[in-house]
Image (tube, grey):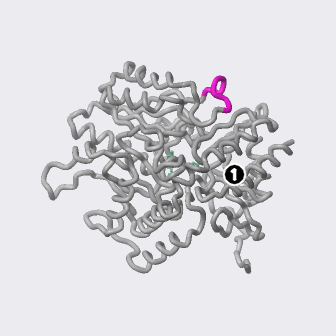
Amino acid sequence: MARDHIVPNDLRAYWMPFTANRQFKKAPRMLVEAEGMYYRNLSGDRVLDSSAGLWCCNAGHRHPKIVKAIQDQARQLDYCPGFQIGHPKAFELANRVVDLAPDGLDHVLFTNSGSEAVDSALKLALAYHRSIGQGERFRLIGRERGYHGVNFGGVSVGGIVANRKVYGSLLTGVDHLRHTHMPEVNRFSRGQPEHGVELAEDLERLAMLHGPETIAAVIIEPVAGSTGVLIPPVGYLERVREICDKYGMLLIFDEVITGFGRLGAPFGSTHYGVTPDMITCAKGLTNGVIPMGGVLCSSKIHDAFMHGPEHMIELFHGYTYSGNPIACAAGLASLDVYRDQGLFEKTHSNASYFEDGLHSLRDLPYVIDIRNEGLVGAVELESIDGLPGKRAFELFIRAFESGLLIRVTGDIIALSPPLIAERSHLDEIFGRLEQLLRTQD
Ligand code: PXG
């Protein structure tokens, strides 16, 4: 295929997100095409995608049905105001999302990203308590090592230090549970680690410390993704749910990564059989192709706002692009593809093959832990003394140069291949990783 991609000779203007900008601009890594499991770089070489872009392209790249849906929608209705006006696809997508969710989560707000979904959910939690006469519930509880996007609410409840520490005092009234990483007892666990259910008791302690009647909501990722894939210990999510119920605190599952099939079920909550009061999602909602996120909530929450004069707006919240028609078209097509290609079931049936492949890397140099669930996994490497993150970053560069896209965070390699991955693709990912790990300096 002829390649006519023009590369600007000045890269200074674009300040790239979560990127080592100076390093990048000295030796840029550009992708210019994609199809299925592969990208292509500027030289036309294939790059195998082991991270579904950034955990989002679950149906792989440039899926013809999703591409067509977006093209058709752009030709038909490009934009429609979302306030006081609707278009059919927003309602259709909301129904389809709710159908996949656990029973009881019957309503959806649309946003444009996971970060916006999180901040919307936190605001909704506060407004809900006020609407039922419990306005004294103002506290929000997150968890160490949690990632809930980059907006003020999400950073406040988040627990990744580098994402927080330079941004001032953030929201007040926030506290954190301890994270659930216990390598001393859970190293190389397959699926849910055996130890750590007792960490859920942190919530009981925080309730006693602050007064449970002051806590509005608890937000956690069922599987903590960004921090390097931490799988919930057996019984942990159930216990958090119990404590929330005991004290009337809302439970929010941030399913931006675990939503839409990553664990082999529509949501992490369906996979683990624990139903929160709200779910935040994004990424796989539109296969990552058009920005979109959402907040699913229970009828209990929704109905609490549905009173007062009917001409009045019930919730003063929303975005210019909430329910954008092209995003909705991408969402509907993505959900069709997930269903028609049986991608959640495929993930479920590939999970143990993925697990075996991942754990086969266990004895390679510097590997200190491996964790997995569904089609998400992590290989943790021993950090170089005084240079945390360097070992994995170098591996990332070498992988990219050799035609494999991986995601690294600190010294952890996180894998989350598109759910269309055949076993041959998984073999290729693990084969290449083995080679790269074996040949480290
Ligand atoms: N919550 C969770 C659980 C996430 O994983 C967000 C919120 C924010 O979503 P947006 O759409 O605002 O980015 C996320 C996003 C990585 C990585 O490799 C993870 C995310 C985004 C980009 C990179 O660690 N998670």
Give SS at disc 1: loop
Q: Specify start and end residues of the magenta stretch as a single range.
A: 182-188
Task: Report the side of 2 relative to 152 (left or right).
Answer: right
**Closer to the camera, 108 or 143?**
108
Image quarter where the N terminus lies is bottom right
Residue at figure coordinates x 48%, y 61% from the top left: 286
Q: Is residue 186 magenta?
A: yes
Residue at figure coordinates x 30%, y 31% from the top left: 137
The residue tagged 1 is 406
**What is the x, y in percent for residue 367?**
76, 36
**What is the x, y in percent for residue 233?**
54, 30
Q: Residue furthest front?
A: 349
Residue at figure coordinates x 38%, y 72% from the top left: 79
Residue at figure coordinates x 74%, y 46% from the top left: 393
**What is the x, y in percent for residue 328?**
41, 65
Give neighbour class at mark 1: few <14, some 14-19, many 20+ (Cα, 10 Å). many
**Closer to the camera, 136 or 410?**
410
| Image vertical order of residue 301 relative to residue 67, above or below | above
**What is the x, y in percent for residue 412?**
68, 40
- Does the numbered disc 1 mark a residue whose Cβ is under 8 Å from ligand 1? no
| Image vertical order of residue 397 relative to residue 222, above or below | below
Camera sees residue 387: no
Image quarter where the C terminus lies is top right
Camera sees residue 32: yes
Circle 1: residue type: Ile
Task: Report the side of 10 relative to 200 (left or right).
Answer: right
